[in-house]
Image: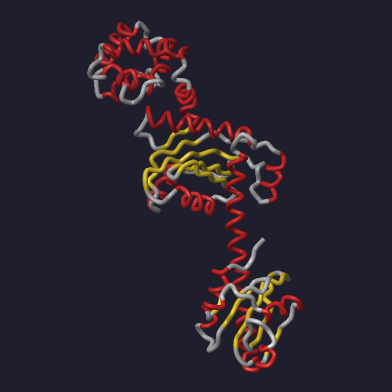
Amino acid sequence: MFELDHDLAQDIVDRAMAILPCNVNVMDSQGLILGSGEPERINTRHEGAQLVLANARIVELDVEAAKCLKGVQPGINLPLMLDGRLMGVLGLTGDPQQLRTYAQLVRMTAEMLLAQRHMQVEQQWRRQRCDDLLALLLGGSGDSPRLVDEARQLGLKPQLPRVPCLFELESGPAAETLASWLMSRYPDSWCVSPARQSLLWCRPASATLDEVRLLDKLQRHGWQVQRLAIGSPAQSLEQLRRGYRRVRDLLAYGREVLPAERTLTLARYRLPALLWRHRNDDALDELLEPLQRIRAKDASGQLLATLRAWCAHDGQSQACADALGIHRNSLRYRLERIAELSEVDPLRLEGMLSLYLGLQLLAADA
């Protein structure tokens, strides 16, 4: 529950005393002085404030009345209210008759500051709770009806189809500031930062996205995106959790195999990313054996580069030769050499597929 604290009380005092020729005190809901123009009075009890708290009304004290109370000077004491709740007491030292008008103005200002601080605290709590909820929804306990219901109450719309996108930032402002930027421009987005330079962005599936323009815009704002992995639309929380794991694998694949690629889509690299996730499985070793035989006799890396280009151009001879800057006859010779060393024919669909799958398990420098 929101309460007056020393910092807020002293802020009210400092603002009031900047324009008023009298001392100002701010007391909490127990009558303890939290802020004062007289520092020695802070953390002492104010009996005049206790009268205000007991009756929820303004209490004016002249010289004679002040003498009857402990820790009190002549002045006027007013209740500070927030949404109908008595939060504390504002006290001005001096002749009550001369302070009445000033006191009401200062009280109005103080209550405005109270409301503003309360709103800030509420917003901060809401942001933190939303962050905690998102982490839980995307984690192992994300199907809990209680969590899903709370997410709905906070306006997170857990039923909305979303696309998981994982940013890897090279430099620039922290991921938290990127999250704020994205959520302000793409309503109903979810953002979770697994690390300082990493951000999971679950954007609404209905939002159109031009990846190139987005990355250019982010760069102009100071974010250097090293790579962005984009998943498939998820219709449920379970699908979204699976999608997060897929884009995480996709990002790891791109980092090792395609370091020059800034944008990686699951639609294009689904199979390579899946293989990369299981690259340490013994059952996949047979896919690497033909490539290891090629690499043993390919000191310059020319044959592996040719094979990558061959797969990238779907076995189209002219397109592959043009991409490599060589004649088709030279390409044919290299493919024959690849078949000889690997004992797999890249001109046949089965052989090309086997070699292609093996290439997905090799790092970029292999």
Snapshot colouring: secondary structure
Q: Nearer the viewer, residue 58 or 187?
A: 58
Q: Residue visible at 60% across and 90% down?
A: 94
Spot the residue most to the left.
Answer: 300
Q: As rendered, which of 233 and 329 lies closer to the eye? A: 233
Q: Quadrant of residue 236?
A: top right
**Which quadrant of the structure image shows residue 35?**
bottom right
> Image height check: is 175 above or below 308?
below
Q: Residue furthest right?
A: 55
Q: At which x and y percent is residue 105?
A: 62, 84
Residue 336 horizontal/vertical position (percent): 30, 9
Frontmost residue, 261 versus 112: 112
Q: Residue at x 38, y 23 (%)?
A: 312
Q: Residue at point 61% right, 85% down? A: 92
State left or right for residue 142 relative to residue 278.
Answer: right
Point out residue 261 in the picture as x, y percentages from the top left corner. Answer: 38, 34
Residue 90 drawn above or below residue 194: below
Where residue 28 sits in the image (x, y, percent)? 64, 71
Q: Quadrant of the C terminus?
A: top left
Task: Answer above or below: position of 114 versus 135.
Answer: below
- Could you tell me which quadrant the N terminus lies in? bottom right
How many numbered tags mark residues here? Answer: 0
